[in-house]
Structure formats: C-alpha cells, structure tokens
Image (cartoon, rainbow, N blue to C red):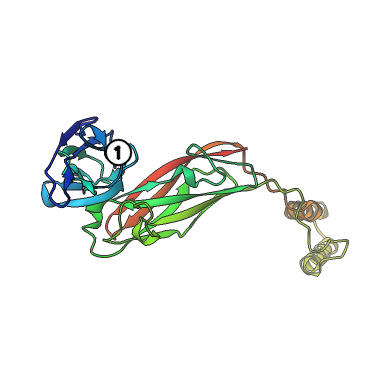
Amino acid sequence: MLVAGLVIALAVPALAATGVSTTTALTAGTLSGCAQPLTITVTAGGSPVTSGIVTINDVFNGVTPAVQLGSVSLSSSGTASPSVALGAGSHSLTANFTGVTGYAASTSSAVLVSVVTECEFTVAIPTSSFTPASTTNTLTLTAGQSGSFTIIVAPSVEYTSTLTAPMFVTLSCSGLPDGATCVATPENLEILSTTPESCPSGSLPSACPPTSNMVIETYAASTVKAMLPTKPGNRSNPIAWAFLLPGALALSGLAFGTRRRRWLNRLSLLALVGLVTLLGTTACNPRYYYLNHGPPINPATPPGTYTVTVTAQSSNGVTALTHSTTFVLTVN
C-alpha cells in the first residue's frame, strides 16, 4: 500500500549538467482514487534550487524501462506539487531534477505506491473554471440562470501506452433537479496513445488532456400562459354532428316504433341516452378546460442544494470503462 508521508532522498552525481551537487526528495501524499499527489523538493547545500525542471518517472509492475509520467517546474521555494494518475498495480516513482546552469542533476530514491482501483482515466472539474466564479466546488445559480465549467479527462500513461486505436469517452451528468439540464460541448472526447495525463505550463491545447465545456441551465417560472391560436366560440362541430345525428335519428325511430312493452323500451332508451351523455361529458371536459383555461404555467427549477455527478464512459465493445466526479449545485 501507499507509504504516505515517506521522504527518501538520494544525491546522484551530475551526468548531463555540471555544477553544485543537488539533492532531490520525493514525498507521496494520500492516494485519492487514482490521483496520487506528490511533493518534490530540490536543494543544494541545504538551500532551495529555485529554477529548473523535474520529471516524474514510474516503473509500473516491475516492468522496465520506466515510463515518464510528466514534468513540472520548480517554484521560487524550490518545490513542486504535481498530481499524477496511476493505473491499478504497483508503482515505483522517482523524481529526476534535470539540472540547470550552476546546479547538477539528481534523482530521488524510489517511493513505492500500490493502487487497487483501476483508473484508466480521471475526471476532474477545476474550481477556477466555474462560471459564475466560485472558490469551492460549488456552482451557485438563481432559477432561470445558466452556469458552466470545464471537464478534464486525463488518461494514465500506463493505460495510453496500451492503446492501439483511439478511445472515445462520452460525457453525461445525473442528479440535477427538475427543470434543469446539462449539455457538454464536445460530448465525446478522443484519447490517443500519445495523449498526456497533465498539461505542462504554457503548453498548447494539443499537448494537454482533452477538455469539454459543460453548461448547466435552470429555468424560471413562466409568467404568461400560452396563447391559443383561435377561440372556439359557439360554432358547431360538423364531425360531432356526423356521429350524433344518425344516433339521434335511430333513437327516435326506436321510440316511435315500439308497440309492445312500451315501458321497458322507454326505460332502455333513457338508459342509453344517459350513457351517451355521460360519455360525452367525460370526453369533452378536458378539452373544454384546455380551450377555456389554456396550458398550465411551467414551474421554476426548485431551490435547494444538489450533488451532481459528471460521468465519463467509454467502451471497447466488451466492457465499459466509467469514471466520474461530483460537484455541488445550489439553486436559489
């Protein structure tokens, strides 16, 4: 399992760059699903190295050579805090400082991480992408307002290295309140064997994981009822007369043509007229209400706080690969 908080550092003599010897240290934080946070520090004689690039390498399930998961720039404090996506299995992670003018390269000792959950790709929503802006993983809207955010689908390097054909991931959402919708643009994202799992600073979009923009739309209550194209008035309906007139004539003939058991025939006639009246009333009531009152007013999206799940799913024709993330939707 993950050795949380373990820091092991090893100075390695410079090979590609010459200068003051450096020490690179790698710390593995608490694994969250398939996202592994890392902390890297580079020092020289106890002082931080404030510039340069560090690459993160992984020996996956003991298979060499190591796979490069990504690279990150050192901050002014001599540290970097990247997060990498790891597939299910054992990982031996190292951080390699490539060296800069005046400072030699160095590599950290390996940190062992074990991942149980299969993570072909991760789904993330950057907090900074919420519109309206938010400082938390919450989208706050007023009924009738729409909002948006960015979805990042980042594949693990171990997974993309096994791809022999493009993989398409379909985005969807669930958990929205009544009267709210979500639309992702694009709805399908393509992952190739060359798709990176992170986006280096200043990189072009083609050198970053695929992204999509999802719009959440809510609805306010309608204030005006739908107008009917015409008012029915008192005009007679020829279709109704086509059914009723023959029936009325037949009933009249039955009434006048009876000679025997007059009371029984009249009773049957009354029952039949009552049945026809009842059926006509039942059939006409909804139409009468609609024609005189119109359609009902559409309700607003109900206020409240909802946990919405954004799901990314792909299938190879045999098994479906599904990963998701959540955010909070607040409707006022």
**Looking at this view, is 308 or 224 the one in front?**
308
Q: Residue at x 23, y 31 (%)?
A: 4
Q: Which residue is mark 1?
A: 78
Give the image location of residue 33, x and y in percent.
30, 39
Counting from the top left corner in percent of width and height, residue 284 is at: 76, 55
The residue lying furthest to the top in this view is 5
In front of the other: 227 or 53: 53
Quarter of the figure with the N terminus:
top left
Image point 13% across, 47% down: which residue?
Answer: 14
Q: Secondary structure at mark 1?
A: loop
Q: Quadrant of the C terminus?
A: top right
Q: Is residue 289 left or right of residue 125?
A: right
Residue type marked 1: Gly
Question: Badge 1: few (under 14), some or many (20 or more) residues near its Cα, within 10 Å?
Answer: some
Quadrant housing residue 109: top left
Q: For residue 90, say whether it is visible.
A: no
Q: Is residue 270 visible?
A: yes
Q: How many marks?
A: 1
